[in-house]
Amino acid sequence: MTVSTRSLLHLFRPGSSRSDPKQFERGLAAYENGQYLEAFRFWRLASQAGNAEADYRIGLLYAKNEGVIGSIPDAAAWYERAAQVGHTDAQFQLGLIYFNGVKAAVGPNRPEMWRQSTATRMGDKATNLHDLVFPYGTGVPRDIDAAFRWMSAAAEAGKAEAQSFLGDMFANGHGCSRDHAAALRWYQAAAEQKAASGEFALGDVYYQGRGAAVDFTQAATWYQKAAEQGHIRAQVALAFMSLKGTGLPANAEEAARLFQSAATHDDAVALYNIALLRLNGKGVAKDLDKAETALRKAARKDYLPAIQALAEFYALGTAAEPDLREAAYWYEKAAERGDVQAQFFTGRFYATGTGVPPSVRQAAKWFERAAENGHATAAHNIAVFYLNGNGVPRDVATAIKWFERASEGGISAAGVQLGRVYSAGNGVPRDQVRAAEWLSKAANGGDADAKTAYAQFLIQDEPSDERLAQARTLLNEAAEVGHPAAAFQLGGLHMGRSGGVVDLPAAAQWFKRAANAGHVEAQHTLGLLYSDPKSGLKDPQAAASWIVKAAGGGNAAAQFQLAVMYCTGQSVEQDLAQGVAWYEAAARQGHVTAQYNLAVMWGRGQGCEADPAKAAEWFKAAAEQGLVEAQLAIGDALRAGNGVAQDRDQALRWYRQAAQQNNEGALRRLQAMGESVG
């Protein structure tokens, strides 16, 4: 307490003023009628006459903001006045205040805001003014020693709540040395007065074996006594014991009743657990709507298990169709609370735009947080982000750090990425030794994709017979467990790639295994094999079937080939409209010859209605990729104004580009336009 506080209290010492001894009763009557300011006036007069109960009541007025401006520091000053003359309730309240401390409230019209403002404006001169306006200060510093002293006084005077609290202080070593025996004595004292807090504490003592031997039966007995008095935590504890059959017979119905009773007081743990029981219909009727309501209430109380459960409830569509917006919202709430799995899910939601607007920056943020908390897959993901500069600045060194963390966490794909980074010299010096080490380590983990990647590394450039044999072994192991990329690579080896012995029937078998598993490039390659008369495997129908599958799978080369087949009637019935459609599919993927052929068909009206503008558009696309025929065609269109605005300069530009490749047609066009071709 400050000097100014003590001096002010001195003014109200007993005997400083003579007042009517009925002042306290008058104040009590005024209070009961809701006339709080009148109560304050009467009680202050009673306080001047030395009435400790009046001091305590004035403290309550300040604590409750009744008739006076609410102020815990003022309340504490009045409590201390009463406590010093032995008022038990005041001692207890004072102990609570010192135990918890009270931070000065900051905000508009708050005393602390005024204090800070005047201190800024007036400097040292503000101190005396502050002491005058706020003699008790604007906050109460936490003082565990003072809390222990006042709580001990109240407990020794027989206040049951103080005895329970003092027991907790001894149990946890707050303001004293930890002493479970002393804690037990105070709990027993409170329980003897039938205080629910003491009974609950005794339940904890016997359940946890703190100060007494573990005795679940005794624990259940004391929890029961407290629960019957409406002690919420006791009801929850007893519910768990009933659910598990600990210290008393298992009884799911009784557990549900107790959880529900505590849940009516909005206890988060009880709300969460009654929700789980309703979800499963255990001990209570299954009711998904009520379960969701209880989970939501608990989640809004920031109870992490409930937040997690609610996110999963919506993600799985437990009650109806999945609601991914709600799921994403609650997963992010859990992520903010530090739940690592939720951080990973939230990153994935933002990366894919699931339930939230897509945001690579938010995805990167949450993947990195999850990675920092040890989530291996998140570490791999954020490494990829740093490697490619997605959502974060490109930083190969940081990417390597996270790939290494992911690899340590058992993510073989991270080892593969590290191998590729070092093999290609992607942002780091090229290092084939380190590349081999990482790829080998990943492959040794047994992952089929890692084995395939290591095999590809071994057969790059001109492999030795030893490396080629090792690659074959790895690919066979991966292919045998159904990895299509490995089967495709084996097909390539049997076609003589990387110096392997040519065996086209064997190649076709491996390609077929990959193709049947949906490997689009294998489907296309198989189509080429079956259409090649030199392969010895020619089968037009099989070729067409695989080309169709590859084209449908998005392979641009297959789409182009299928367009040719439809235009020529090769292995399929001729259909120019289908030819246009497949040329366009390939053209939109950047297939340059498809772009040129599509332009020709639009220009001639083959399989479509002639459209010179569309023809010019696709000629230009192919020309920009360097196709000479397209450069001549777009030059001709610009020269003649066919489908585009006539533009001699632009026509000349395209002719010159074609002429740089020594194209005779371009040279002739330039000469015809009077341009030098030297």
Image (spheres, rainbow, N blue to C red):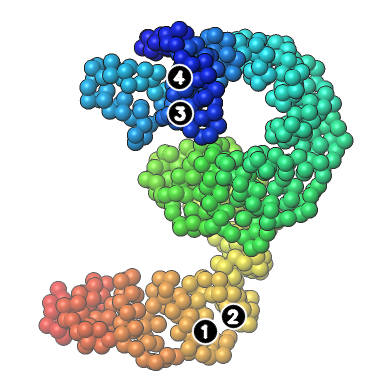
Q: Which comes sooner in the sequence, label 1 or label 3?
A: 3
Instruction: Please state the horizontal and vertical placement of residue 204, each as a whole percent of the image.
Output: 73, 24
Question: Can residue 176 be seen from the camera position used here?
Answer: yes
Question: Can residue 420 be seen from the camera position used here?
Answer: no
Residue type indicated by callout 4: Arg
Q: Nearer the viewer, mark 2 or mark 4?
A: 4
Q: Residues within 10 Å of mark 4 (few under 14, many from 20)?
A: many
Q: CA distance from mark 3 to mark 4?
A: 10 Å
The residue beneath circle 1 is: 565
The residue beneath circle 2 is: 544
Residue positioned most to the right = 249
Residue type indicated by callout 3: Glu
Q: Tell me whether the residue at label 1 lies in contact with that at label 2, contact meaning CB atoms closer than 8 angstroms.
A: yes
Q: Nearer the viewer, mark 1 or mark 3?
A: 3
Q: Residues within 10 Å of mark 3 (few under 14, many from 20)?
A: some
> Residue at 59% of width from left, 70% of height from top?
523
Q: Residues within 10 Å of mark 1 (few under 14, many from 20)?
A: many
Q: CA distance from mark 3 to mark 2?
A: 99 Å
Q: Is residue 529 left or right of residue 106?
A: right
Q: SS of the residue at dot 2? A: helix
Instruction: Please state the horizontal and vertical placement of residue 318, each as a whole percent of the image.
Output: 68, 57
Q: Which comes sooner in the sequence, label 1 or label 2?
A: 2
Quadrant of the image occupied by residue 373: top right
Q: Which comes sooner in the sequence, label 1 or label 4?
A: 4
Residue 99 bears which disc, if any?
none
Which sits in the foreground, 483 or 377? 377
The residue beneath circle 3 is: 38
Q: SS of the residue at dot 3? A: helix
Q: Which quarter of the figure is the C terminus placed in? A: bottom left
Q: Tell me whether the residue at label 2 lies in contact with that at label 4, contact meaning CB atoms closer than 8 angstroms.
A: no
